[in-house]
Amino acid sequence: MPSIIESEGSELGDAHWVQARESGIGNSQVETNYSDERRIAILAAADSAKLEWFHIKVSLVAGIGFFTDAYNIFAINIASVMIGYVYGGGDIPPRALTTTQDFCLKVATPVGTFVGQLVFGWLADVYGRRKMYGFELIIIIVATFGQAVLSGSSPTVHIVAMLAIWRTILGIGIGGDYPVSAVITSEFAAVDIRGRMMSSVFAAQGLGAFLAASVACAIIRGHEKAILAETSLDNLESIDFMWRLLLGLGAVPGVFALYFRFTIPETPRFTMDIKQNVERASRDIKMSLRVGEDVAVGEDAPEDIGIRRNTLPNFWDYFKRRENWLVLFGTAYSWFALDVAFYGLGFNSAKILRTIGYGGPSKDPDPGSVGDVLREIVDNLQKISIGNLILVSVSLPGYLFAVLSIDRVGRKTIQYMGFAMLTIIFVIMAGAYNVLVDTQSGLKAFFALYCFANFFQNFGPNTTTFIIPGELFPTRYRSTAHGISAATGKFGAIIGQIVFSVSESKGSNYRSIQIALGVFGLFMFTGLLSTLLIPETKKKSLEVLSNDTQTVSGKGKSRRRGF
């Protein structure tokens, strides 16, 4: 029998042998199964690989998708204000979207994302990560272009309704990107760099939000003269063009990433465990990670290596075990709790900014003076765009801290810390709200607390809730379980928007924010509790973390994780 595991891969190879034995598989049984030996060798090679250009390429290709997703999600903050000026209602100018219109426009994307995460998560486990990887990006590009070229409102269909439909479709594509990107990155990554790779992919979200805020500032600055030159408040053509340009530019990064999405190889774990093709996985891992002769390569033919099939009965058999469904509940609810606040505040940053003086009318404009109203519109758009840029900028260090510390500190520790800090911050902001917003010094303190909240969301559960579900489950269910966790999070995003809309209908903008902050603080505390159900994943192979026997026909016994 040829040597399969050599040099630097040997230690991890030995670890996989130990895992097989601990799962209840006898030495003789393992040693006589050559296919299983090769599977162990491939896993050892992938898990022990040094950082290669291929790892960087995978992170970049996945990251560009998240960059595009975040741009499209957060560009609506300022775009909705622009749309309100052009198509909103109200007897006294400037116009604005109604609470219902604003709610529909902002909740449409999370609704679509919810669907996309469930559907594409399942499809990626059935048909492969690679096959799904480009299709969701095509949906994003088409939907982004579609909303940018919409015609104006008609007597039968309001443009906000059509925008909501397009943004729901956009959300489906964005939703598909979450489980597929997470799983592709985790399954290609070596154990020692998996956290950094996955957090780097997710950090692209911050860069996308930053670009959306920056582009909004540039567009508003570039069209200031055109806005002031308008002659009628009933036909603001310059602003109508601005929001279309802002949203439409979100398709550009996706177009550049499309080729790489379709040409990325299938992950070796899917090829082995789902397609049952050990030799193809051997060749792919050798070509991608340059592992030399450590992995034997033979004929490209499917063979039975004893992995349980991805069937509904097997799915229920796995998740009906208490230790497994509790982990899924922990990952799903933690994401839910986080997104209630993350998107509740993120989609309503313009309202937060008005509280601290960035945006909103500084005086009552004279409805008869078109020039005054136009000047007020320009000032408001500039304040909101600059304020958004500031908020996004102060959140970027959180992503950086997460990337640098995730493989040393650990996912669970960072999630604990983040939820704990967010609970404290939101409780203080809600409890001392009236004091904070009454004085200039209080407003500065309020803004500082809000910035700290953004920091600890990203150096905390916003990053870890994305990473952990991509590590904890067997290959055959990994994408589905990540999709379930992510979709539960987007249900939380919908709840967060409902909280803001309902609290806004109960009182003024100031009162609604206080109520929302109090509710968000409660959810952060429950997220802290749900983290107890999740095991630490750093420095462990995906096969250990899956809590599942993935060798020799599934005859070994599962080892229960400690919580």
Image (tube, rainbow, N blue to C red):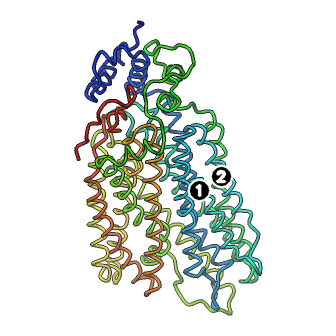
State left or right for residue 109 relative to residue 200: right
Disc 2 residue type (three-letter): Ile
Quarter containing the N terminus: top left
* Label 1 with label 2: CB-CB less than 8 Å: yes
Q: Quadrant of residue 7?
A: top left
Q: Is residue 546 above or below residue 336?
A: above
Callout 1: helix, strand or loop?
Answer: helix
Q: For this rendering, which residue is in front, 116 or 436?
A: 116
Q: For this rendering, which residue is in front, 436 or 9?
A: 9
- Give the spatial CA distance, label 1 vs label 2: 8 Å
Q: Which residue is mark 1?
A: 172
Residue that appears at 44% across and 59% down: 488
Q: For this rendering, which residue is in front, 16 or 221?
A: 16
Disc 1 residue type (three-letter): Ile
User: Percent x, y for residue 447?
Assistant: 37, 70
**Which is more N-terminal, label 2 or label 1?**
2
| Disc on res. 139 | 2
Q: Residues within 10 Å of mark 1 (few under 14, many from 20)?
A: many
User: Percent x, y for residue 319?
Assistant: 37, 47
Residue that appears at 55% across and 80% down: 99
Q: Is residue 377 above or below residue 334?
A: below
Q: Quadrant of residue 103?
A: bottom right
Callout 2: helix, strand or loop?
Answer: helix
